[in-house]
Amino acid sequence: MADEPKPLLIKRYASRRLYNTETSDYVTLEDIARFIRQGRDVQIVDLKSGDDLTRQYLLQIVAEHESKGDSVLPLAVLTDLVRSYTTQAHSVVPQFLAASFDILREGQSKMMETAMKPMASVPGFEAMQAQQRAFLKAVTGGMSEQWSPSGKGNDDDAEPALSRGEIEDIRKQLAELQAQLSKLNT
């Protein structure tokens, strides 16, 4: 089994400055967000105490994006998250969120793979495919780079069945992507 790469270690100094141990320079929250969008895992630790501050800084990055109007989390989801801290549900929320994002990544990857199959013989297909990858990267903030080409996030042979609603959502998203690609080509 191959070793997973170690996360990028960021040290926080007493002055609250963040230090990238790989490049030996100081970084900002936006730099850390960019590393994550590029597929890097990061670990942020307090230099003096050794405490892991990664969660705190990732939440700060999300909060800054949300406050700038880059809203990804609907108000109802934020409300439910706050409520989950005071209920018995808080123990299952992390697993639910992780599974939900896995399903989202797998569904989007399969949608892109399915959309590309009939077009492989079309002249200029590779250029169009590169445009779609760039578009998907821009839309997902780089998360799409973490998905495997097969669309499978794990080694399981069983593929979950999609509901009619999920299939319809995928069709709508595909139609929107095709319309945007048509606009790019004109």
Image (spheres, rainbow, N blue to C red):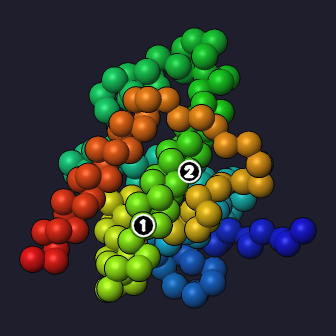
Q: Are marks 2 and 1 in contact (CB under 8 Å)?
A: no
Q: Residue furthest left?
A: 186
CA neighbours of label 1 inside 10 A, class few (<14), some (14 to 19), many (20+): few
* Residue found at x 38% / y 76%: 129
Against 121, residue 110 (above or below) is above
Considering the image in quadrants, where does the C terminus appear?
A: bottom left
Q: Secondary structure at mark 1?
A: helix
Amino acid under disc 1? Pro
* Residue found at x 16% / y 77%: 185
* Residue found at x 58% / y 68%: 149
In the figure, residue 6 lies in which quadrant?
A: bottom right
Left or right relative to 179: residue 22: right
* Residue found at x 59% / y 46%: 102
Question: Mark 2 and mark 1: span between their CA atoms?
Answer: 20 Å
Question: Where residue 2 sits: x, y (%)?
Answer: 85, 72
Considering the image in quadrants, where does the N terminus appear?
A: bottom right
The numbered disc on residue 106 is: 2
Question: Where residue 62 sits: x, y (%)?
Answer: 40, 49
Residue assigned mark 1: 118
In the figure, residue 79 lies in which quadrant?
A: top left
Q: Nearer the viewer, residue 93 or 22?
A: 93
Tell which tag, 2 or 1, sits nearer the viewer: 1
Question: Where residue 8 sits: x, y (%)?
Answer: 64, 72
Left or right relative to 147: residue 60: left
Residue 105 appears anywhere in the view: no
Left or right relative to 138: residue 153: right
Amino acid under disc 2? Glu
Q: Residue furthest right?
A: 1
